[in-house]
Image (tube, coloured by chain):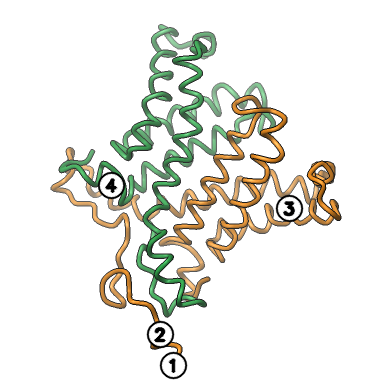
């Protein structure tokens, strides 16, 4: 939760208060876009670039690896679009959290370890997705514009 | 009087707290039963992301630059910066101590703004020319830069030392 209205008497430079108040609501938008942009490049590679991770799913011992791979591709392709719009933010965030946790600890960690092509960034994406799921879409989100919210 | 020259308040009257993400209105929810859960986690989300960012940047990246003998001196030379060693240790310090400050939410806006600049330089001047986009590339540095910009805009949020101390930059 962000304090959108920063009281001037809390600030060392009180004149910044008006600027801070203008910027604050964009914070959640920027965080959403940062995660969405990165995810989308991966979703694009999987859906359009023909890199569906069927092999990876088979290695995880999942049934119907092709269907699961397609589901993951859709999640990484359409999920970021929803995140960017701020639509169903909490649900999409939670789904991406689960996906990225599985990738971090089920796929990458056993093979690569922490850094260098490892799971640190997928873990970071997982935790930011969780953070957005907790926080919701913020003020500039479709969730807030529509009558109902998930 | 300097105090009387304060700009007009952007929100409601002084002292009233207006927050972006406060209202969890059960009547608006498709599943109203989720309202208590949302109310419990909503105040935590932003500070959680801030802490994750600070800790994950500070521990692996700043730590190895400062204490495991991997200051990025060659990178600084490649950027044609004067005193590359000074720059390398400065970047290590920024990542380690700045990450800690961000995790605690102290001087949040300043530290986050510095990270934004750092990640922009890494993304566009260091990684992009060599690796391109999604191949070992700058996507993650760019992502971290965007996150840092978000924190620079948002400040410390509900649970931060900035908030606790009651004075902030």
Q: Earlier in the sequence, mark 1 or mark 3?
A: 1
| Label 4 with label 1: CB-CB less than 8 Å | no
Tag 1 residue: B1
Tag 2 residue: B5
- Give the chain of mark 1: B
Tag 3 residue: B91
Mark number displayed over residue B148: none
Residue at left 29%, top 69%?
B11
Chain in green in the render: A
Are discs 4 and 1 both within one chain? Answer: yes
Q: Nearer the viewer, residue B36 or B87?
A: B87
Are discs 4 and 3 both within one chain? Answer: yes
Chain in orange in the render: B
Between the residue at mark 4 and the residue at mark 1, the CA separation in whole angstroms equals 47 Å
- Give the chain of mark 4: B
**Label 1 element class:** loop
- Give the chain of mark 2: B
Quick check: B157 left or right of B32?
right
Are discs 1 and 2 both within one chain? Answer: yes
Which corner quadrant of the image does residue B60 belong to? Answer: top right
Q: Nearer the viewer, residue B92 or B55?
A: B92
Between the residue at mark 4 and the residue at mark 3, the CA separation in whole angstroms equals 40 Å
**Label 2 element class:** helix
Q: Residues within 10 Å of mark 3 (few under 14, many from 20)?
A: many
């Amino acid at each position: 939760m962000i304090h959108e209205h920063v009281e001037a008497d809390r600030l060392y430079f009180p004149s910044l208060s008006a600027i801070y108040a203008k910027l604050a609501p964009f914070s959640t938008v920027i965080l959403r876009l940062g995660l969405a942009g990165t995810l989308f490049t991966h979703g694009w590679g999987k859906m359009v670039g023909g890199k569906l991770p069927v092999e990876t799913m088979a290695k995880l011992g999942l049934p119907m690896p092709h269907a699961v791979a397609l589901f993951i591709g859709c999640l990484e392709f359409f999920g970021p679009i929803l995140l960017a719009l701020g639509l169903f933010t909490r649900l999409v965030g939670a789904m991406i959290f689960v996906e990225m946790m599985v990738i971090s600890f089920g796929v990458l960690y056993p093979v690569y370890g922490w850094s260098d092509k490892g799971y640190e960034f997928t873990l970071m994406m997982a935790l930011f997705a969780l953070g957005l799921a907790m926080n919701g879409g913020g003020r500039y989100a479709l969730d807030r514009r529509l009558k109902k919210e998930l | 009087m300097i105090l009387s020259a304060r700009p007009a308040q952007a929100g409601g009257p002084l002292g009233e707290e207006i927050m972006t993400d406060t209202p969890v209105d059960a009547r608006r929810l498709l599943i109203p039963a989720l309202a208590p859960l949302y109310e419990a986690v909503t105040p935590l989300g932003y500070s959680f992301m801030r802490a994750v960012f600070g800790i994950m940047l500070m521990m692996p990246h700043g730590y190895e630059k400062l204490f495991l003998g991997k200051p990025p001196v060659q990178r600084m030379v490649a950027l044609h910066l004067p005193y590359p060693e000074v720059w390398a240790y400065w970047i290590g310090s920024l990542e380690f101590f700045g990450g800690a400050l961000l995790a605690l939410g102290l001087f949040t806006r300043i530290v986050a703004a510095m990270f934004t600049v750092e990640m922009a330089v890494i993304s566009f001047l260091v990684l992009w020319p060599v690796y391109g986009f999604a191949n070992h590339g700058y996507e993650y540095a760019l992502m971290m830069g965007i996150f840092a910009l978000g924190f620079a805009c948002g400040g410390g949020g509900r649970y931060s030392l900035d908030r606790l101390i009651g004075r902030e930059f």
